[in-house]
Image (spheres, coloured by chain):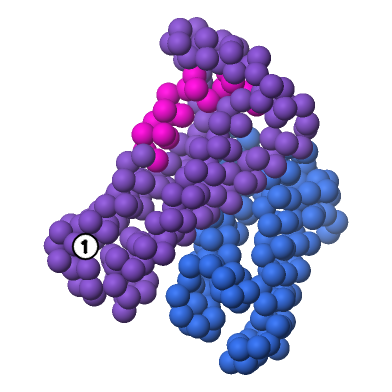
Amino acid sequence: MSLQTLAQWLSETPLALELADSNWLFGTVEALHVAALSVVIGSIALVDLRLIGVGPARGSAQEVLERLVPFTLGGFAFALASGSVLLFANPIGYSENFWFAAKFSLLALAGINALVFHLFAQRKLAEPVSVIPRISGAVSLTLWLGIVIAGRWIGYTL
Amino acid sequence: MTLLVDFAAWLGTTSLSALVTGHDWLVPAIQVVHILAVAAVLIASLHIHLRALSILERDVAQGEVAARFLPILWGALGVLASTGILLIASEPTRAIFRSIFWIKLALASAASLGTWAQGPLALRFNTGGVAVAPAQRLLAVATLLVWLAVIYAGRWIAYADAWAGAPA
């Protein structure tokens, strides 16, 4: 099934019709999406800043990571769920939108960066002079900034 | 409302308004900064209130958590106010003529106060160390819900109707 067929099919589902009709529903899900992504961005930023060696998070980078990862994952689950609902409001528009594709490409890169960190960089945390965790943190911060920018730009280019 | 109408008319003639409406990318860019500051407010408040609920940093004194995160809260609120003013200047007839905007400001003030109050309450109940008073738990839950309402109200500015007779 092509992306266009999928978008077409999504746009004819009851949820899509309901979202198109109701500002109330769309605005509510948007607000939940903003709240969830705020928790994701806030927790990720604290971890990344700690990896770089600055910021208000207390304790070792490993401790900060373990303390805040549940917030990142929980927030991400909520953002994904609410974002999936928003998708139904205009599946065809999103499927043709450059910034939507950009946002998901950057999300994929952020995922790869997190995986690389977990597999290779996390063990370097014990070495205080290692520059690898700093690079990982800086890359993550940059990618997430890009994700927020692309996400906001979707709303202006649909 | 006359005062607000005059204010909106004046704001529309300022060079600030001309600047932010002069570039298509500037308004969404300001909104990105606004959202990042929302994230900072939320994560700072979460630390202070979840500490009061003994969920985050429970081995750290409450005053110490507040000392690290309150400056972030105040700084982020400053960014929100500045970017908020720029967003109003980009469209002076929008937010200030909708009740939900003023409700948002009132709720944000209440939530800021509630977040600040955790420190003094910890001292008042002599729980500045590890223990937490029941009143602090109540304040934590209530204030976090009010922050959620602030986000909801903020998003609602886009959908609410303006007051009857407001400039279009």
Vertical order, B114 against A128 (above or below)? above
Q: Main secondary structure of the magenta part?
A: helix
Instruction: Give the secondary structure at mark 1.
Output: helix
Q: Which residue corresponds to mark 1? A: B122
Look at 37% across and 63% down and name the residue there: B67
Give the colour chain A carries in the figure. blue
Toward the left, the furthest residue is B125
The residue located at (48%, 14%) in the rendering is: B4
Going by the numbered disc 1, the residue's amino acid type is Ala
At x 72%, y 70%, the residue is A139
Question: Does the image show residue B33?
Answer: yes
- In this figure, what is the number of numbered marks? 1
Depth check: give the residue in front, A122 or A11.
A122
Pinpoint residue B152: horizontal percent, then vertical percent.
Answer: 46, 41
- Whether residue A24 is visible to the viewer of this picture, yes or no, is no
Chain B color in figure: purple
Q: Which residues are magenta?
A: B90-108
Task: Say if the magenta span includes residue A120.
Answer: no
Q: Is residue B102 magenta?
A: yes
